Each structure stands twice: as structure tokens, then as C-alpha cells.
Image (cartoon, coloured by chain):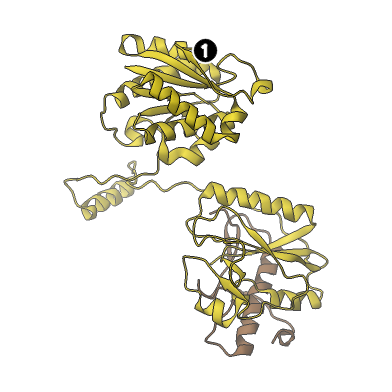
Amino acid sequence: MGANRVVRGVRIEHVCGDPTLSSDGDRELNLRIVMTALRALTTRVDGPTIFDPADTEMREVAGVA
Amino acid sequence: MRVIHYVNQFFGGIGGEDHANEPPRLVEGPVGPGRALAAALGKRGTVVATIICGDNYSVERPDDTNAFVLDATRKHKPNVIVAGPAFDAGRYGLACGAVCQIAREAGIPAVTAMVPDNAGIAVYRRHMICLPTGSNVAGMPEIMQRMAEMSVRLASGASLGSAAAEGYVPTGHRKDVMLDKTGAERSVEMLLARIRGAPVQSEIVIRDYDHVPPTPPLKTLKGVKVGIVTSGGLVPKGNPDRIPAARAEAYSRYDIGSMPELETGKWESIHGGYGHKYVNEHDPNYVVPLRSLRALERRGEIGSIYPWYLATVGNQTAVNEARKMGRQIASEFKAAGVGACVLIPT
């Protein structure tokens, strides 16, 4: 569909988080997904590419929760 | 067979771009390329009248132009309307598409012709029979021959076969047909043909979407202003801009300039295509992740956040409307010095 940098979300109804997690866990996942988007923006791609939040290295996660 | 022909101011012999605001006029008989159409029709039909209209006028005042076209049909009672060919002219292509749609709605068959990537096809493909052309005007006699043949077919009331069989631009409509073999048999035959290396034609043509060349990566996001866009339909509670739940044609912007995060209960998704419970009752940051972006802003991992987020509903949105919004968003961001964008769809 023309999008070249795609981050894998959780579900359509809660793309950037997971309400079944604890509040802290949910906030950390939200941050992880956003950080994955930033990683995508700084990564060279040749065509549509999926970036998985599980592969994103996290630092100072406590800042959000 | 009585034919009305529609042309723009250029092909109608009125003038070039400086006459693009000309209101429509009705002339008896064929004009300009209409003579090639008359020749191609021969004894089978007569070009009884020609509508000539400026390119700007037709796209800027569609209602007036449509009314004029309908008046002309009442006066001349055509069996078919021929519009163009518009070749690669965008406004002319849009005008020809509009003429075909209004004719069809009035029960009069119509045919036009233009290059396959003319904007007229993107907008009107579902409402018109359009023959593909090249962009070279020298192809006029051959195109007029094809338009004449199609006019005769349409005016006779014969039902057309598929776009591939008849040579018109696919309209996006699917028709039910009865075949002797089941889908299972046909798909196995296709599979075997593929294994043999024989040509295979899918029964369902999937529309080919844009292939966008990827933008080069940013070296860093430090110091970069980040814009937030969502097609998840997140708006202030009450939907002040009345964004529709489907088929949106515009986006809105909402102030987040001083907010640390989107507060639950103050925002809602009005998107018509997914369940809102989690976004509306649990956390709107699922769709506009402001809280996390603020944390990254505080840490200096991004420069700043554009003080409005942009929202629309991505639900049954026409590709050309989405493209239009994309262009508008890109120019808004460029003007504001936004260097990166996160777009959250749902």
C-alpha cells in the first residue's frame, strides 16, 4: 500500500499497547512501539519492511511508567 | 444514431490556456476532432452537436457544467455521448469523466478515452466506459475509430463483456457469471499451468497500488521535530469537526501543544471500522502515543513534537482522497519544519 516502514502493532483495537498488561507494562510496550518507529525512521529500507518492537533495544524504560 | 461530442476549449478551437475559463457552449454538428469521429461513424451515426467547455470552468463549476450537458441532451436527444479523447490532460480527463457519469445517470450511454493514469480515471473509473490511449495527439484517427465502434455497441444496448475482452479501462465492477467448472477445478488448473510454466491469468484483478520509493533514513532524530498523524479517527470527545466514520475526504488538527499525554475520557475514536472500547475507555495513547513521544522528547531522543496532531478516518477511504490528504499533510509539515512523522493506522 505504499508504506515502506511499518511497525508491528498489537491489535487493531489497541495498536500501540495492550490493555491486558499491567499499567506499567502497557506503558512500557507503548514506548517500545514508538521507539521502534524511531528506529525505522533511521534505518535504510529497499521496500516495504516490517519492524518488530520485540527487536528494539530498550533503555531507561522507567521514564514513562 | 445521434451523437453529442464533448471537447475542451483547445480541441474546440476557442483557444489555449488563456481560454480555460470559457463557459460551455453548444455548437451544431462536429467540431475539430469531432470530424474524425463523424468520419469513423460514417453512415452509422451523426454528430448532431458539440459541447465546448473551458478546462477550468468544467472542474471549478461542475454543477453548472453538468446542468449544461443535461440541457444539451434534452435539446438534441442523443443515443450516445462521446467525450474527448483527453489524452494526458488532467482537467480535461476529469471533465470527460464527469460528462460520462452525468450521461449514464440520465440513461444515455457514453464513452471517453484518455491515458490510463489520467486523474479522470482515478476519480470516475466506476462511472464510465473509457478507452485507453497514448499521450500522442497524432493517434486521434485511430482512437476516434475505436470510440466510434464502442459508441455503436453502447447505443445498440448490447451488454459489454469484461474490460480485458472489450479493451476498455477496468471499471472496478465485478459481475457474477456461470462457469462449467467449479472454483476448485479452476484453481487446480491454474496451479498446474503455473507449474508447467504456461501463462496464468487470475480471475480477480487486484488493483495495483502505488509503489513508493522509500525515503532515505534520517541519521538521527535528535533535534528533529516529529509530527503525529493518525487514520484511527481519534478526535476530541464530541467530534467537533464532524469527521465522518467512513469515506473521509479531509483531516483535522488538534492542539497537543502543552499536553504531557492524551487523557482518557477527553478523546474518542469515531472510526466506523473497529471497536473503540480500548481507545475510548482505556487509553487514547494507543492511537496517538503522545505520552511516549513526550518521554523521548524529555530524554532528547527527538527534538520536539509538532503541537497539533492530524487526524482522519481511514475507513473505505478512496485512494485518490488519501493521496490528496497525504500531499496536504506533507506540505503542512514541510512548511512547519517537521522532519519526521509517525502515522498510526488502525
Q: Position of residue A51 (x, y in %)?
A: 60, 68
To which quarter of the image does residue B298 belong? bottom right
Q: Is residue B209 shown above or below B162?
A: below
> Residue at horizontal 78%, vertical 70%?
B302
Q: Is residue B117 visible?
A: no
Which chain did the renderer colour yellow? Answer: B
Q: Is residue B207 shown above or below B312?
A: above
Q: Position of residue B211 (x, y in %)?
A: 56, 48
Q: Is residue B181 shown above or below B301?
A: above
Specify whether A53 is left or right of A62: left
**Which quadrant of the figure contains the N terminus of chain B?**
top left
Specify whether B243 is left or right of B199: right
In the foreground, A22 or B272: B272
User: Residue type at mark 1?
Assistant: Gly
> Residue at horizontal 40%, vertical 20%?
B75
To which quarter of the image does residue B19 belong? top right
Label 1 sits on a secondary structure element that is loop
Residue under pointer 1 = B32
How many numbered discs sit on the rendered protein? 1
How many other residues sit within 10 Å of disc 1, few (<14), some (14-19) or many (≥20)? few
Specify whether B178 is left or right of A19: left
In the foreground, B164 or B71: B71
Which chain did the renderer colour brown? Answer: A
Q: Position of residue B291 (x, y in %)?
A: 70, 78
Q: Is residue B91 shown above or below A4?
A: above
Q: Is residue A60 visible?
A: yes
